[in-house]
Amino acid sequence: MPLLFDNNSSREQQHPTRAQQWVWTFGDGETYTTDTAEAVSHAYANAGVYSVSLHYYNGYCDSTLVKNQYIRVVEAPAPGFEVDNNRGCSPFGLTVTDTITEFVRKKEYNYYDGTGWHEVAKDDPQILMNYPHAGNYWVVQRLYGYTGCITQQDSVRVYVTPGVTLADTIHTQRGSYLQHTSTDGAWKINYRGDGYWQGAPEQIELEWTSHAAAVSYHIHRDGIKIAKVDSPRLVYHDEIGIPRVVEYRVTGEDSCGHETSWGRSARPIKLDGENTDNEIAIITFSPYGETVEEIEYQVYVEQDGAWEVLSEVGKREEYKDMDYAQRTSEQMIEKCYVVSDVAGAIWSNVVCLAYQPTVFVPTGFTPNGVGVNDVNHIQTYGIANYEVEVYNRYGQKITSFTQEDNGWDGEDAPMGAYLIRVRARDIEGKWYDTKQTVSVVR
């Protein structure tokens, strides 16, 4: 900053023809000569203590005034600072480290977050700053020197993108087995209670809430992270193989790698069942959880490849099918079930209960063409296929048929008693032999 030197010299006489002259010597090797008694400014480039002199000539004689160590020039504050990071996710904290010199009387910072200038302790080399919201900001330093000079030259740009914290949560909104028929996959339970999976691997569909700052989501099954899904997708299909009770939770991750907490979980409905001697089927299932609403359930039964509502069960987690053995065809192999909420949005796995292998041969029929009991139909439970041979009273085989045929119509068979032999194979490959006397009544 230039200093202004006033010229206060006085004179009684001045030569009429010779010019006046003032010579300033500033002590730093610089001089200035003028022929008027003007004020003079001078800027010192370096700190130090300087003597200043003024030499005056009025045309007759000259005189010099010297002021020793008259000017003391101190170092100006040298601005400077560093930040540990200028990019991050909200809430973003940064550390400002000063690199300034010692010639500072006061120190201020402006973080351009709308709060203006902040005075900080001049001896504090580090300042912590927090940006709670996303945006682009500046960090600017302003220094005040002992002589009143102000320097404001150093600045840093700060970029803050949206972020998440552990206070944020992602809720799993839905966890459901994919709806499908038994031919695409089912948990098969034989009449002894042994279960096995048949079909394509089971899949569970998950849905969850979104977070504006999340760039990806992490899927957790039973507390273990199993998958990562990029935003904005909010659906994931988990292939679990065979049905079992599992719990899912979801967390969100921002662009800085920070992760949310998980909120509500989802436990898909796991369905099981039991066949009690071909009389009653007991359907049991695990409750769906967690949800903000109470769940009411309904049980479906499979009919010709489609699901039909069998019964609403309310909040109960068990259903007894008293019509389990009710015949819908001559060949009953298994009965398949599925459970859902009453809205039909959340589904369980499919369970098929196999009937205990049973062969029933009617003891008589009347093949008289009146349309009632005209054909001897073999009725089975839990049987995959069978072969039938019919013998007369002399032990001669008179006909044979399989499950592909429409039974024995008794054509040309005289009234009397016949022996029917059935060789049947259950769905596990075991063979059974059954003999029954059948009467033909005309």
Image (cartoon, rainbow, N blue to C red):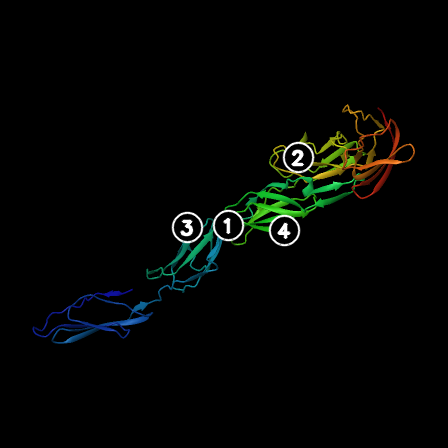
Kindly identify which residue carries mark 4: 226
Tell me which amino acid carries mark 2.
Trp
Kindly identify which residue carries mark 3: 113
Q: Which mark is residue 307?
A: 2
x then y, percent, for residue 401: 80, 37
| N-terminal-most mark, 2 or 1 | 1
Between label 2 and label 3, give the one nearer the viewer.
2
Tell me which amino acid carries mark 1.
Gly
Classed neighbour count for the residue bearing mark 4: other residues with Cα under 10 Å, few (<14), some (14–19), many (≥20): few
x then y, percent, for residue 28: 28, 73
Relative vertical location of residue 441 with respect to residue 61 in this rendering, above or below: above
Relative vertical location of residue 21 with respect to residue 162 in this rendering, above or below: below
Task: Check the image and name the residue furthest to the left.
Answer: 16
Tell me whether circle 1 and circle 3 mark residues in contact (CB < 8 Å). Answer: no
- Disc 2 is placed on an element classified as strand
Relative vertical location of residue 326 with respect to residue 111 in this rendering, above or below: above
Classed neighbour count for the residue bearing mark 2: other residues with Cα under 10 Å, few (<14), some (14–19), many (≥20): some
Q: Is residue 432 left or right of residue 331?
A: right
x then y, percent, for residue 280: 77, 32
Tell me which amino acid carries mark 3.
Asp
Classed neighbour count for the residue bearing mark 3: other residues with Cα under 10 Å, few (<14), some (14–19), many (≥20): some
Kindly identify which residue carries mark 1: 163
Q: Hey, which quadrant is residue 276 in on the image?
A: top right
Task: Check the image and name the residue furthest to the right.
Answer: 394
| N-terminal-most mark, 1 or 4 | 1
- Disc 4 is placed on an element classified as strand
